[in-house]
Image (cartoon, rainbow, N blue to C red):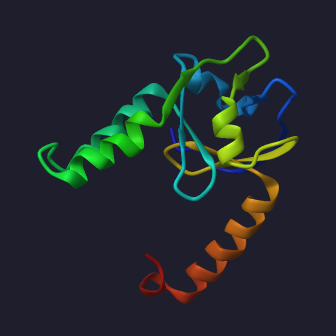
Amino acid sequence: MAFRGSYEHTLDDRGRVALPARYRHEFAEGVVLTLGEDGCIEAYTPSGFAEMSDLAAAEPVTTLYGRRSRRRFDAQSWDTELDRQGRILIPAKYREAAALEGPVMIAGRRECLEIWSPQRWERELREATAASSAGPESGE
């Protein structure tokens, strides 16, 4: 499954947000949240998270980089599930780190859904557009 598109949703006062209806069936087995490096929250299916975790673990655990890669990805993850209304609970520390309150943007990023504050999402879109116009040599 390739996640794509962007969707406007609202975080309720308990920290829950509905996932886009078209993708809810993909998360029937659960949802794994992790803090994204770009200021958002990433929502993976369990199998998608396992694939990304394997990539983070590509460097041997015997190296400092290998251990830190695992810690950054695996230790900052949170298992949750959809409720009957198709919502997930986002822990308070994740909401704070991603500056989520009220309206949120949920964006598909092929391997996961990203949950953004609208302000950060707009900034990211501008930067992504500028970077893609400049070509691959201008990015990281």
Count of numbered tags? 0
The spot of residue 61 in percent (x, y) is 16, 42
Instruction: Out of 94 and 112, give the one closest to the viewer.
Output: 94
Left/right placement of residue 31 relative to residue 99 reads left
- At 47% from the left edge and 79% from the top edge, which residue is drawn? 139
Instruction: Out of 58 and 39, give the one closest to the viewer.
Output: 39
Quadrant of the image containing the C terminus: bottom left
Instruction: Out of 79 and 84, give the one closest to the viewer.
Output: 79
- At 77% from the left edge and 44% from the top edge, which residue is drawn? 100
Left/right placement of residue 134 relative to residue 116 reads left
- At 25% from the left edge and 43% from the top edge, which residue is drawn? 57
Say if 103 sits above or below 81 in the image: below
**Residue that extends furthest to the top in the rendered view of this protein:** 84
The spot of residue 33 in percent (x, y) is 55, 33
**Residue that extends furthest to the left in the rendered view of this protein:** 62
Q: Quadrant of residue 8?
A: top right
The spot of residue 81 in percent (x, y) is 61, 18
The spot of residue 44 in percent (x, y) is 52, 35
- At 62% from the left edge and 72% from the top edge, which residue is drawn? 128
Instruction: Out of 17 and 64, give the one closest to the viewer.
Output: 64
